[in-house]
Image (spheres, coloured by chain):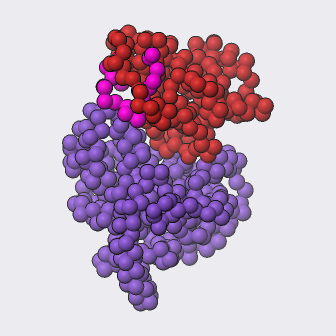
Amino acid sequence: MAAATTPISSKFSDVDEYGFKRPENFDYKAYEQFMSNYLKTLAKRRKRWEEILEENVDLSNINSKLKRYIRKGIPGPFRPDVWMRISGAYKLQAKSPDLYRSLLNAPHEKEISDSISIDLPRTFPDNIFFETKKDSLYNILIAYAHHNRDVGYCQGLNYIAGLLLIVTEDEEKSFWLLKHMVENIVPQYHTKNMANLLRDMAVFKEMVIRRVPAVNKHIENLGLPYAVIASKWFICVFAEVLPAETVLRIWDCVFSEGYKIVFRVALTMFKTHKSAILAADDIGALANFFREVLIHDEIVTDCHTFMQKVFELRLKRSELESLRKVCVGRNNT
Amino acid sequence: MATTPRSGGSAGGGTAQRPNGTSQSKSCQFKLVLLGESAVGKSSLVLRFVKGQFHEYQESTIGAAFLTQTICIEDTVVKFEIWDTAGQERYHSLAPMYYRGAQAAIVVYDIQNQDSFQRAKTWVKELHKQASPNIVIALAGNKADLSNIRVVEYEEAKQYAEENGLLFMETSAKTGMNVNDIFMAIAKKLPKNDGANNQGAGAGRRLNENENNRQTTNCCK
């Protein structure tokens, strides 16, 4: 395994704990400061979670206490099991215990197999742990593509499945969690016409108009489509967009609370970066900001504070649902 | 291989000239879209052109990306607004948003992949039908560094391009071969008198002096 070189004057490696290389302009100083507190928080959370898990309650029943705990972060070692339980994926798996193996053993279409194979080497190429996981990633994606024919293989699923694999270190769990994500959290984002993705891009824009109108106006004036800014956020549920730890904190809540979290996070990104977005004075600078700056700046790297901000936002499911009705069929956001 | 556009670090001497600093150089801006099948090298061509970099395993583009690069043709500063699209078939429904109003398109195929050449032809047809009538289209046969294992013959593609009024070059994002050249060839073919081609996103718009701090240009001597 490649040894990570630690940047001078930082006790943190230039590779994060999930094997991802930190960006070149990573602010180690800010990160150290954040981690000095966050590590204590993590230790505390872990103790609390040990107590919960000892009680052996049904975690698929998300009461307000459990929800609160999840929002504060599921400790890393418990994530695979807790995700499987809170999402209901374990229950689904129990109903079809042989499904995954039989999908793998069935004949596979060459066209699907080829398109997955093309994406394997370009999934997390810089991740130092991932090289050995490519066969497992192929298995998850080929099994899912044949399981859900409406989706097949959609680019972007490789990032979701890849990150699931890094966290769970288990092909079959990753398969079931991927299925849950694609079918229950963001259904018909990845299908052949991407209908719901296009609709939700429009919904997101409407929410930005309501919450941060100046930001929307600025983006419109400069002429950058929301699809360029945010389709990857939605398609990948932030995998390969935000720093891994931040994505996992988001996914903790996605598995327990559902799609609303995706909108919460996307809106929080716009709100917290309002002044930086407004400061971009041409479309190139704006696109660059979204592509390279905002996705790993201090605000999102400090996942704990970021998640607090995510939940400060007022957002009701009913608002989202009524906007969805209005936005059906829009395809040019 | 010192071709004209340079960006970021290479202009690090701080001597980058602003268009305003030169005498009366014209400046205009064009919307350019990249289309083509998945994994033919669209993003790699853009990365090479804009940043002079190449990644062996370029991550697949989800949705679309937007970048800019400025080059000089004679006395004119040409700024490209580049819309790099996702290649997978299902992302096709998003594509019209990007080629609508584009003044130029690069349709890319992989010289090792016959299907990608057929797909490129389909894109050309769609552009002829749906895009601006004056759009300048270039066909790029990418991965030319692998020409010993090519399946699409140079002559075949060249003939197709001629029959359809396209610019044509074989390119290699990996070595840089013809990458700047294809953008230059497009820039040369585009009308540069202000307002001549105005239906797109800001054709002939004056460049903002503060734009592109990161992507300086040291051409226009």
Quarter of the image with the C terminus of chain A in it: top left
Is A49 positioned to the left or the right of B45 in the image?
left
Residue B162 falls in image quadrant: top right
Residue A33 falls in image quadrant: bottom left
What residue do we see at 63% from left, 12% from top? B163
> Range of the magenta residues?
B200-221
- The prevailing secondary structure element of the residues shown in magenta is loop
Residue B56 falls in image quadrant: top right
Q: Does residue B112 belong to the magenta stretch? A: no
What residue do we see at 42% from left, 44% from top? A291
**Chain letter, colour purple:** A
What residue do we see at 38% from left, 9% from top? B193
Relative to B87, is B18 above or below? above
Q: Is residue A331 visible?
A: no
Relative to A272, is B173 above or below? above
Quarter of the image with the N terminus of chain A in it: bottom right
Relative to B100, is B64 above or below? below
Measured as percent of width and height from the top left, residue A301 is found at: 38, 60
Measured as percent of width and height from the top left, residue A248 is found at: 44, 65
Is B162 positioned to the left or the right of B214 in the image?
right
- Residue lying at the far bottom of the rendered structure: A55
Measured as percent of width and height from the top left, residue A313 is found at: 24, 60
Measured as percent of width and height from the top left, residue A286 is found at: 34, 39
**Chain letter, colour red:** B
